[in-house]
Amino acid sequence: MASSIMSSEPLLLAERNVPRYTSYPTAPHFNTGVTAATYSSWLSDLSDRARLSLYFHVPFCRELCFYCGCHTQAVQRQQPIDEYTAALKAEIAILAQCLQRQPISQVHWGGGTPSLLAPRGLLGIAETLNRTFDFTTIREHAIELDPRYVSPELVDCLVKIGVNRASLGVQDLSPHVQHAIGRIQPYDTVARAVDLLRSGGVEKINFDLMYGLPCQTGEDVRSTAERICTLRPQRIALFGYAHVPWFKKRQRLIDPAQLPDLAGRLKQMEAAREVFLSSGYQTIGFDHFALMEDDLSIAARTGCLHRNFQGYTADDTDALIGLGASAIGRLPRGYVQNAPDISGYARAVRSGSFATIRGIALTADDRLRAYIIERIMCDLHVDLRATSSLNPDCQFESEISCLEPFAAQGLVHIDAGELTIGEAGRPYVRLIAAAFDAYLAANAQGHSRAI
């Protein structure tokens, strides 16, 4: 990475909280004016051949990791899991009343730990889905897994329901870091999970790693990256730990004095990046890496990369349907979100109603800015002149003015409305995209550090 990135001035620019831009407008700006009736209306507007993606949120884990910012809770008994499985089936049944057996392109199970639904639950949901949607042209069926709970029986079930990609949460392989984050998970456990998945028929593997964790050093990050590369995952996501104890109380178990400073985080990120690039991975956006033959790399090279609530994706479907407590859906007319509390979600769908409690209807300005932000996040380039056909009145003078400090440091180049971010500016892409966020000032502190 260029040495200028390590100077004090760019680091001062990064001392801000900004969204990860998995959507625009972002979730903090959703409102209660979007209801279950709104959602039903928006679904009815979809063409009967609209291509859909499905996202299932399973908000359960056997135990909670200190660092986690996901919407999940610890559960030891099977009964609440079985009840949640029934609620997911009830939500699918409500969808069946609004949709016309649309084709499904992608399915993603997230959480939490989706495998806690167990083979019986997963198979039951899959049967319900097959009666509701058309899966003949599905491209990807992915699930997030905890390597500590991958078994031959689970892998056999995943193959039966059509899973062809698994994303494993690794974070860091250093014992002292694992102790500090409350997740003891040796390398051998991860390697065994990978072997079980690949030998069982799930050949596409993703890893989630983190930097900026308590007690973590640059050497810890580098060592983890090197060991991970020996397992040859198709994709790697390198997330910066977001310390938001006011939002996730479990993070209060982490001593903020043990967290690296901003310069340390940047060095850790670069240490991992050097390992990945030298091992044959392509950089995707600002925090993903993929082998050159992977769909994500191909999408990045061809300008077809997108961003959604799972991060960078090759998903170009017409709508994303979110199922489960707190799940967010994206439709042409706007975003919808389910009730975050499990009991409230379950009561709604059992009564035959969607559990939608908030969302946002997209304006013309939202769509324009969403396009600009997504292209910056995905391509590190956008031609603002090309957006004039969408809204001739938007010239973005003030936004370009806000980017002058970044341009002065060589992090972004702006020429006659054409914005290009070079390698030196890649770590700052969220900050650069934030210049076009018309909502940000209202909730800047609700987001994580940019780096």
Image (cartoon, rainbow, N blue to C red):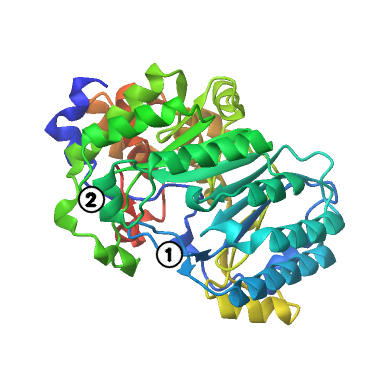
Does residue 388 lie above or below 281 as drawn? Answer: below
Q: Which residue is mark 2?
A: 214
Mark nearer the viewer, 1 or 2: 1
Residue at 59 percent of width and 42 percent of height: 166
Where is residue 329 drawn, in percent x and y?
Answer: 62, 57
- Alpha carbon separation for disc pair 1 and 2: 19 Å
Residue denoted by label 1:
63
* Residue found 51% across the figure and 32% down from its top: 235
In the image, residue 408 sits, relative to residue 125, either above or below, namely above
| Residue 126 visible to an observer of this rendering | yes
Depth check, front residue: 368 or 173: 173
Residue type of the residue flagged with mark 2:
Pro
Give the mark nearest the N terminus, 1 or 2.
1
264 left or right of 354 in image: left
Task: Name the residue type under label 1.
Answer: Glu
Q: Nearer the viewer, residue 187 or 333?
A: 187
Which residue corresponds to the image point at 53% horizontal and 51% vertical from the top-left?
Answer: 366
Q: Residue at x 73, y 82 (%)?
A: 351
Q: Quadrant of the C terminus?
A: top left
User: Tag 1's secondary structure?
Assistant: loop
